Image: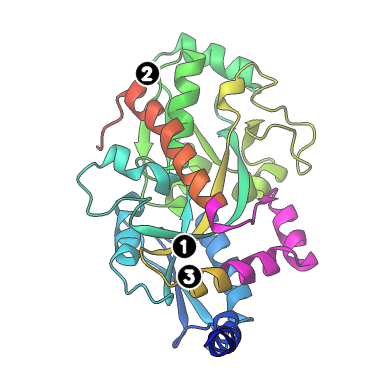
């Protein structure tokens, strides 16, 4: 009997190791195209498409600060064919919208963390400031007359702006946009004064001198802009945070699917070509096992949930 059980286990192992979806993998990005979440989603989809027999595609389902796309994944069959490429804002969405139909932790299966990226505090050159200290002085002298933008209520850009506003003791008005494209256009045109945005997205316009970078939020200076101070160097160490991106599936996914997808993502992240692309974005590779992503989700919810409560942030 024991011999037959061992034989059955040995026969089952290759099937688990070779798990593959029965149809093209759908990676949902819960935001409109053009932002860093979209870029990361397409990078992961490209890697999985090259490793799975039926490929992988990205589907943008933007709206309601990521709720629309995330809800679609939470309700999808837990067969591993529909996944969510989630930004760090996913972890705190229920702190803002307690009545949404899903829980960002318990209704999803963590698969793999992908990468983290620093934010950069950017301003339109129409403001008189050219350093972070000058901006804070200007904002304090003009309370409520400066606006800062985000790509949606409760997004990392929004929460980062709220945290910095409180730490610096300044009054700014928050303006929420539906996605990255529109907010960047208004920032370039001067209709918006300031925002935190992923350094990867803003690097080209910063290098061109079209916008001014005041500080990066990474613990160390970015190799992309070695002369730009960190926000900690400017005296706001508590605002030194990075955004991250992770791959999630619906609750109840088969473990063989989770393990296979985790292995494939980590395999892609170990490739020199992937590292080169992420380095060019100023991103830091994460990877690791599903539990690492679950831990990250819990820590993010605890930290930013407190910021939301302290700032009394409510949906607009």
Secondary structure state at the residue bearing disc 2: loop
Secondary structure state at the residue bearing disc 1: loop
Bin the neighbour count of mark 3 within 10 Å (Cα to Cα): few under 14, some 14-19, many 20 and up.
few
Check disc 1 and report the residue beneath it: 33
Instruction: Kindly identify the residue that appears in the image at 52 percent across and 79 percent down.
Output: 56
Q: Residues under labels 3 and 1: Cα distance? A: 31 Å
Q: Is residue 35 visible?
A: no
Between circles 3 and 1, the one closer to the viewer is: 3
Bin the neighbour count of mark 2 within 10 Å (Cα to Cα): few under 14, some 14-19, many 20 and up.
few
Q: What is the number of the mark on residue 255?
A: 3
Determine whether 82 is above or below 292 in the image.
Answer: below
Instruction: Kindly identify the residue that appears in the image at 41 percent across and 52 percent down.
Output: 179
**Mark 3 vs 1: CB contact within 8 A:** no
Q: Residue 276 appears at what percent x and percent y?
A: 77, 60
Determine whether 273 is above or below 94 in the image.
Answer: below
Q: Nearer the viewer, residue 316 or 290?
A: 290
Quadrant of the snapshot with the C terminus:
top left
Q: Nearer the viewer, residue 207 or 300?
A: 300
Check disc 2 and report the residue beneath it: 144
Q: Does label 1 or label 2 sit earlier along the sequence?
A: 1
Instruction: Kindly identify the residue that appears in the image at 46 percent across and 25 percent down.
Output: 163
Q: Does label 3 or label 1 sit earlier along the sequence?
A: 1
Q: Residue 29 appears at what percent x and percent y?
A: 44, 63
């Amino acid at each position: 009997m024991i011999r037959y059980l061992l034989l059955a286990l040995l026969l089952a192992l290759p099937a688990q190791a070779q798990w593959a979806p029965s149809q093209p993998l759908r990676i949902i990005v819960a935001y409109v195209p053009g932002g860093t979440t979209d870029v990361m989603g397409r990078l992961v989809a490209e890697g999985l498409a090259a490793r799975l027999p039926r490929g992988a595609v990205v589907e943008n389902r933007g709206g309601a600060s990521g709720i629309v796309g995330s809800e679609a994944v939470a309700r999808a069959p837990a067969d591993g064919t529909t996944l969510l490429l989630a930004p760090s804002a996913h972890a705190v969405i229920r702190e803002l919208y307690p009545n949404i139909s899903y829980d960002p932790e318990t209704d999803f299966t963590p698969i793999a963390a992908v990468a983290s990226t620093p934010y950069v505090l950017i301003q339109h050159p129409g403001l008189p400031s050219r350093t972070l200290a000058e901006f804070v002085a200007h904002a304090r002298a003009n309370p409520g007359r400066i606006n800062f933008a985000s790509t949606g209520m409760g997004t990392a850009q929004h929460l980062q702006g709220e945290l910095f506003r409180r730490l610096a003791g300044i009054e700014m008005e928050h303006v929420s946009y539906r996605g990255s494209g529109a907010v960047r256009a208004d920032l370039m045109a001067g209709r918006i004064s300031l925002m935190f945005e992923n350094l990867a997205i803003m690097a080209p316009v910063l290098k061109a001198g079209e916008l001014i970078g005041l500080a990066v939020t990474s613990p160390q200076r970015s190799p992309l802009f070695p002369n730009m101070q960190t926000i900690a160097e400017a005296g706001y160490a508590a605002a030194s945070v990075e955004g991250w991106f992770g791959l999630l599936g619906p609750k109840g996914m088969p473990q063989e699917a989770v393990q296979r997808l985790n292995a494939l993502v980590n395999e892609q992240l170990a490739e020199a070509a992937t590292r080169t692309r992420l380095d060019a974005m100023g991103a830091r590779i994460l990877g690791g096992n599903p539990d690492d992503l679950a831990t990250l989700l819990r820590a993010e919810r605890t930290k930013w949930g407190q910021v939301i409560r302290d700032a009394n942030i409510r949906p607009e």
